[in-house]
């Protein structure tokens, strides 16, 4: 464990083992922060499997075992760390699973957020707070594109839990004067994305087909449209929100939407293959209630935070395909990559 240095700013990240948590930890370390993370106890028992995304950071971050389901454990972490900034990213984040288990999704996501805010208010009320809100809160969208003023209409227990977290965060800001900001982040992906999310399912599935380990790729609704950016860009917006004089709510998005089908075509084009020969749309992967279209308007984040998405759709897909192919030791033939770029 590192010695605490009084001149460094201290950040606490819940969900540090996840996609965003890992990029955010890297960003904060690069800015000289002392970085602390909340992890589940089992993660410390099995670091090689559960701490994979932050494996290269383990010597430089402080990890604390706590449970989002237990207020005393969260309270204890705040008492120990006394952070200057808290990024609350931990959540049951898979929308599809929230239809199978509404109860644990609501419990973890709503109570977890409440516990973090309540501990912060009691122990370090000057600590700045970021809540990982989601475009899924817009659900059956009431206007296109979606802005900070668009009405929420969530379509899943996950979306409902995020609306509750958003409201809790705003209420702590208004009622107790906490510097608490909501990010309304649209989908963001990377080679560190979990395998069950559609983008990673496509790029890892494609790599397995190329390797000869799979013959097809079974997906659900191919017509759904998402505003996809890169997680590495989006964690910068989180940090920028907490550097503002006043707390606020911000949409973080690229402003461009693509269908799942577009993503598939772009991924298969990278390796010069025809998706129609491999992709099967399987009703088993359809959701009981779908969010059909998301497209965000990031104008406020651009003007107030000076934030911009740096990675475009093609760059994102190319990076994910290349990383998954490399991970399986699959060569992308040079001719195919060159053709794909034309
Ligand atoms: P992720 O990769 O699924 O990471 C989720 C994190 O939450 C992991 O560290 C996970 O820990 C932790 N977690 C889950 N359940 C927990 C529990 N019961 N107790 C303690 N920790 C728990 O998600 P992400 O993509 O990085 O997203 C980060 C946050 O942003 C989430 O709140 C997500 O809902 C929100 N968000 C994501 C997107 C997106 O497109 N990525 C967009 C909008 C909002 P383990 O490693 O131990 O499972
Ligand atoms: N996961 C998955 N698997 N999705 C599929 C599949 C499939 O086989 N086939 C089609 N899809 C469609 C889903 O129906 C959905 O419309 C879209 O692909 C994206 O699904 P996910 O990648 O699972 O992401 P999500 O949009 O539901 O949720 C992600 O983005 C939210 C922000 O809008 C998650 O990261 C959430 O945590 C995040 O809040």
Image: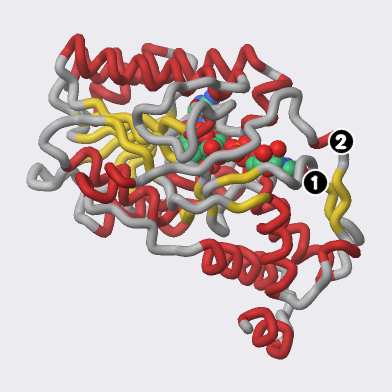
Q: Quadrant of residue 57?
A: bottom left
- Residue at figure coordinates x 15%, y 17% from the top left: 177
The location of residue 164, given as percent across then percent down, is 44, 15
Is 324 situated left or right of 21 in this image? right
Quarter of the figure with the C terminus: bottom right
- Residue at figure coordinates x 58%, y 41% from the top left: 46
The location of residue 163, given as percent across then percent down, is 45, 20
Give SS at disc 2.
helix
Give SS at disc 1.
strand
Return the residue nearer the eye: 215 or 213.
215
Judging by the rendered image, the residue that carries numbered circle 1 is 219
The answer to whether residue 310 shows anywhere in this view is yes
Q: Is residue 70 above or below residue 263?
A: above
Return the residue nearer the eye: 153 or 91.
153
Q: CA distance from mark 2 to mark 1?
A: 8 Å
The location of residue 322, given as percent across then percent down, is 63, 71
- Residue at figure coordinates x 52%, y 44% from the top left: 187
The verdict on label 1 being within 8 Å of ligand 2 is: yes
- Residue at figure coordinates x 66%, y 50% from the top left: 259
Judging by the rendered image, the residue that carries numbered circle 2 is 283
Which one is earlier in the sequence, the residue at label 2 or at label 1?
1
> Ligand 2 appears in which quadrant?
top right
Q: Is residue 62 above or below residue 286?
A: below
Q: Which mark, by number, is residue 115?
A: none
Dot 2 and dot 1 residues touching (CB under 8 Å):
no
* Other residues around mark 2 within 10 Å, as few (<14) / some (14–19) / many (≥20): few
- Quick one: which residue is furthest to the front in this view? 143
* Other residues around mark 1 within 10 Å, as few (<14) / some (14–19) / many (≥20): some
Return the residue nearer the eye: 17 or 139.
139
Is 249 situated left or right of 112 in this image? left
Q: Is residue 181 above or below residue 111?
A: below
């Amino acid at each position: 464990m590192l010695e605490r240095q009084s001149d460094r700013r201290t950040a606490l990240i819940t969900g540090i083992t996840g996609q965003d948590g890992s990029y955010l930890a890297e960003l904060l370390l690069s800015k000289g922060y002392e970085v602390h993370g909340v992890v589940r106890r089992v993660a410390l028992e099995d670091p090689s499997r559960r701490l994979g995304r932050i494996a290269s950071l383990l010597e430089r971050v402080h990890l604390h075992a706590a449970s989002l389901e237990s207020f005393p454990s969260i309270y204890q972490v705040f008492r120990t760390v006394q952070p200057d900034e808290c990024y609350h990213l931990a959540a049951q984040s898979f929308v599809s699973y929230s239809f199978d288990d509404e109860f644990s999704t609501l419990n973890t996501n709503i109570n977890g957020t409440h516990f973090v805010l309540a501990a912060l208010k009691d122990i370090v009320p000057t600590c700045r707070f970021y809540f990982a809100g989601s475009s899924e809160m817009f659900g059956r969208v009431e206007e296109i594109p979606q802005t900070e003023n668009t009405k929420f209409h969530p379509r899943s227990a996950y979306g409902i839990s995020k609306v509750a977290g958003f409201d809790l965060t705003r209420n702590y800001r208004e009622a107790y004067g906490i510097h608490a900001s909501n990010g309304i982040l649209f989908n963001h992906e990377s080679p560190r994305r979990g395998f069950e999310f559609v983008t990673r399912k496509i790029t890892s599935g494609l790599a397995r087909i190329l390797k000869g380990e799979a013959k097809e790729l079974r997906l659900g609704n191919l017509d759904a449209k998402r505003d996809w950016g890169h997680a590495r860009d989006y964690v910068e917006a989180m940090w920028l929100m907490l550097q503002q004089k006043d707390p606020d709510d911000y949409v973080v998005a690229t402003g461009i939407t693509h269908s799942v089908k577009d993503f598939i075509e772009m991924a298969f084009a990278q390796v010069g293959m025809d998706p129609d020969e491999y992709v099967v749309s399987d009703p088993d992967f359809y959701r009981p209630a779908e969010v059909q279209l998301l497209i965000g308007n990031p104008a406020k984040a651009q003007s107030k935070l000076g934030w911009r998405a740096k990675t475009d759709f093609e760059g994102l897909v190319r990076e994910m395909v290349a990383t998954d192919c490399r991970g399986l030791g699959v060569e992308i033939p040079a001719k195919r990559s060159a053709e794909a770029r034309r």
